[in-house]
Amino acid sequence: MMKFESVLAETDGFGRYQIALTILLVFPRITLPCHFLLYNFIGAIPSHHCAITSLDDDWIFENLTQEQRLTVSIPKQEDGAFASCHMFPEPQFHLLNNSTNTTALPVVQCPHGWEYDNSTFKSTLVTEFNLVCQTKGLTKASISIFFAGVMFGSVIYGILSDKYGRKTMLLVSYVTSLVFSTASAFSTGFIMFTVFRFLTGFNLAGISIITLVLCIEWVDIEHRTFIGVIGSIAWTLGNLMLAGIAYMVTDWRMLIITVTTPLGLAVVTWWWIPESARWLIVSGKIDRAYGYLQRCASVNGRQDFTARIKPETLSTVVTADKQGHNYTYLDLIKTPRLRRLTLLTGFAWYGVASTYYGISLNITGFGLSLHLTYFIYAAIELPAKILVYFSLKRLGRRPSQVGTLVLTGVCIISNIILPKDYWTFRTVIAVLGKGLSEASFTSVFLYTTELYPTAVRQNGMGYTSFMARLGASISPLIMLLEEVWLLLPQVVFGTLAVCTGLVASLFPETNHARLPETIADIEQTRKRSICLTMLEQSETPLKMEINEDYAS
């Protein structure tokens, strides 16, 4: 019996072939943050007030400045700004002389619509469909619906990619995401837009989970962390690009089309992407798996691969319990250890995603422009990911996961306590919390691919991605709790981050461990796998003893 890692080592587990694969999957991953966080810009609410254009026909208004017209038409709030949702039923000309007290005057809701400040955005969803005042919650609702699409897509793509293969379903997700996202940009109504965004999110889920799994399944143990972090850095690059693109493209329709364009290039590059050899072996397709492994060895300069590994050798590789068996999500809860792992990872992904999007979709209130705040939030992710890379390698997966989550919660709670007068310090703490939340996301992506066995790995990723998108879809609704108490959303997100960190402390450590192939690998202790991997790096008699014991 052989492990797949032993076969992969004969091809050079991290060579030019794996590097090329990683580069090919960068393009689709760059588009993910551009869509997942797009609502920060297309859903931005510019300054607005009731439309007073109906008064232009009145000759009395001809000699008044715009400021004077607003003064006699719209009441002022306590901070001196004009009200957004109300106006006087009749012009109050006496306010031109004394406008200090307007609270006793009767007001009505805006009868003729609204006028918007177009200095920052040419148009947004809000200005297009008038999603303000009584309907302002619809913007948050549309975000939740988008992530609901991602949530259900994670489940479906998890099933289909385990049944039909990673590569096939990746192409499906590319094409459908491109079509539905472009269609959403041409929506003529809010409901039409919401439906197309749901379908876009549904298919983007396939890109999210398949690209990472495909990379991880093609690299050796030593470089899994590196590949996981590189894939996460692609997210950061997309994040930084979104800040610049949104600054230049201020029309929401053109912005959607612009950030969707890289998927066209992804469709072209798909032809060079290999199928997962692990999945092919699990599915009993030995000849195809051998062909891909041959190609990998050739590109990596391992010309002796065919002499050392024969096609019949792959049939002895320890993979699934039964080749050709179709695993389902029910297999995740049939055995005790895997069931416990499923429950813990589900809660962890929910907490990680809810916290991350709770921070990422609320970037106002720090005294900076929207684009600059978003850029800073995106830029902090890069050093955070570099630090978490070394942390994952040196400290291990579990300490890194627990530490980033708990510290994220501490940052959120600290900003609740700090007075608003210290806005500079509050901004620094908020940016640090954003970096830590992204680091926790980077860690959990890699961690989960190592925890689930190959036989149900895609199902496991589909399930955890479902839980993550559930957390993401609920985050915008949690933000609406600020109507009850302004600080309540931060209390919820901070507490959730700390609790999730405590749950992550129950995970088994996977650093230096072989990827489990079968459900039986999970039910048995993984200490042998960890010890065996470390001992393979030495040439001692003790190693030979343990190898013989492991084989028996």
Image: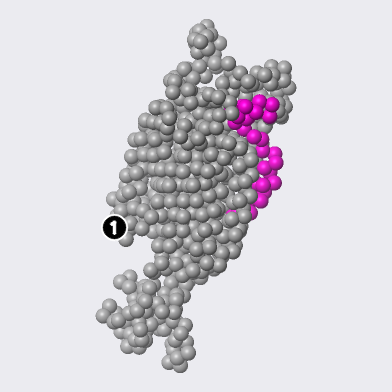
Indicate whether 44 appears above or below 202.
below
Number of numbered discs: 1
User: Does any portion of residue 472 appear in the rendered image?
Assistant: yes
User: Does the magenta segment cover residue 4?
Assistant: no
User: Does the magenta segment cover residue 287?
Assistant: yes
Helix, strand or loop under label 1: loop
Q: Report the side of 325 relative to 486 (left or right).
A: right
Whole-percent x and y of residue 464?
A: 46, 39
Q: Report the side of 30 relative to 126 (left or right).
A: right
Q: Nearest the camera: 161 or 468?
A: 161
Residue at far front of view: 325
* Residue drawn where x is 44% and y is 61% of the image: 139
Whole-percent x and y of residue 339?
A: 41, 31
Q: Dividing the picture into quarters, in which one does residue 292 lie? A: top right
* Residue drawn where x is 66% and y is 35% of the image: 274
| Magenta span main SS | helix
Indicate whether 519 appears above or below 266.
above
Q: Residues within 10 Å of mark 1 (few under 14, many from 20)?
A: few
Indicate whether 510 appears above or below 461.
above
Which region shows up in magenta? 259-288
Q: Dividing the picture into quarters, in which one does residue 252 lie? A: bottom right
Whole-percent x and y of residue 496?
A: 34, 44
Give the labeled residue for mark 1.
Answer: 485
Amino acid beneath label 1: Trp
Residue at far left of view: 104
Indicate whether 413 appears above or below 10.
below
